[in-house]
Image (cartoon, grey):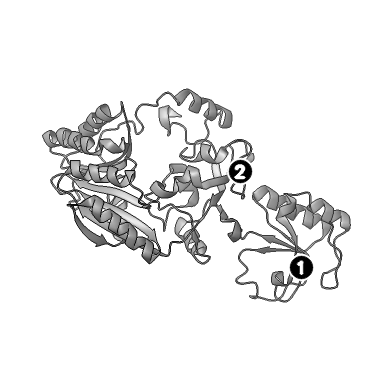
Amino acid sequence: MTPPLSATGTGTGTASAWDELRTIGSEAQWRDAGPEDTVAGIQPRMVFEPQNEAELAAALRCADSAGLAVTPRGSGSKDAWGNPPTRADLILSTEHAWADLTVSVEAGCTFATLQNALAQHGQRIAVDPLWPEHATVGGILSTNDSGTLRIRYGGLRDLIIGVTIALPDGTLASSGGKVVKNVAGYDLPKLITGALGTLGVITRAVFRLHPLPHNIRTFTLAERDWANANQLVLAVQGSKLAHTGLQVRLKSGEQPKVDIRFDGTEAGLAAQSEVLRKLALPATETESNAEVWHARQRLFGPSAQSDRAFAIVKCSVLPGSIAATCDQLRDLSEPLNVSWEAVVQGTGLGYIRFEASQPLPIHQALQAMRARLEPGGSVVVLHRSPGIPEIDAWGDAGDAFPLMLKVKEQLDPKKTLNPGRFVGGI
């Protein structure tokens, strides 16, 4: 229904102009402005909540042609700042729908900034990526950096429900939407997650959200050896515990430590910790702080001795093979005088840092590790310090490579975006 002209409005905008505006987006994205939408005392007529840049641009272009006054609005926390507008017909709302447990965010927003904004409404995106203060939403998606919360809430591909990307030909392609159940069309969000920017430039993403936890508690259990640590990981995974984090910290020559995180009410945490104690006997239990979940990030820090070479790899193995993988690491690194340290999540996804006094032994260790693990797992080289000979970052492209190549040819036929950076030279 076309909104009537009102005494509080400006009288601008014909019925046909409003009708044209209402064809943009869906009916659910439009509503009559209420008293809560006043802008410094001026009452607008309509509020439109665009889902992407194309809808926003179309509404703005249409409003401009019709001579309507447009007020962009985020959360509205500073609507009273500055002078009142001389006119206010249409509000373009970029605030996300808190009640829908979704958020739409520009790709250049840092993750910490986004999480801080969501926390004001008691919500979060349930991922904990590396360097959240600096990493942007687009970069986190491009590298598929989900973090330790993945074991409970799923990875980024499970949490992203919409995306807008700029294709090399200048086309803005959008897929998905702000409603969690919207799965119609090409699954572009999952396709670009982890594509390392080789298919398009992410401009905006829409995520499903989760409530902030009431309380968080982390327990660390020191185990005698790798085998016992692996058994505990499998026991926790096979139990009814509702853990939100599970990782093993391993280092050559040191006792392994298993970290387990729970969140919930105090009563719920007490019940969970009691079950854990029974599972973990006779391991030594201590209550830890949140810093243990930054162990993966610390692997990327500088060496204590600046002249030492190091490399960091991301690997995936079966959860039941964590101890066997540690045995392999020991066997291949000790003859080369290479030390190693690892953080492995309960899913079998691990990050390993190799360090040595010379670059060549690390290169040899990387090659040996890939040869041993690739038949049943994967090894991706994330970082090499200067002097270490070049090695393919990805290793075997696998059976999916022909399909990946066809997608690349369809979206980026001229190989404009990051040529050669991805698997198999894509």
As helix, strand or loop, the secondary structure at mark 2 comes to: strand
* For residue 362, side relative to residue 92 (left or right): left
Would residue 252 be seen by someone viewing this image from the given angle? yes
For the point 83% across and 61% down, the residue is 3
Q: Residue at x 41, y 56 (%)?
A: 132
Image position, residue 205 (x, y; %) = 56, 49
Q: Amino acid at mark 2?
A: Gly
Which is more foreground, mark 1 or mark 2? 2
Residue 265 place in picture, x, y as percent? 40, 64
Q: Quadrant of the N terminus?
A: bottom right
Residue 336 to residue 137: above or below: above
Foreground residue among 142 and 210: 210
Q: Which residue is mark 1?
A: 44
Do the residues under discs 1 and 2 have CB atoms within 8 angstroms? Answer: no
Secondary-structure class at tag 1: loop
Q: Nearer the viewer, residue 373 or 236?
A: 236
Residue beneath disc 2: 176
**Is residue 360 something that shows in the picture?**
no
Residue 110 place in picture, x, y as percent: 47, 56
Q: Is residue 238 left or right of residue 184?
A: left
Picture coordinates of residue 138, whole percent (x, y) = 50, 48
**Residue drawn at x 60%, y 56% as measured from the top left:** 100
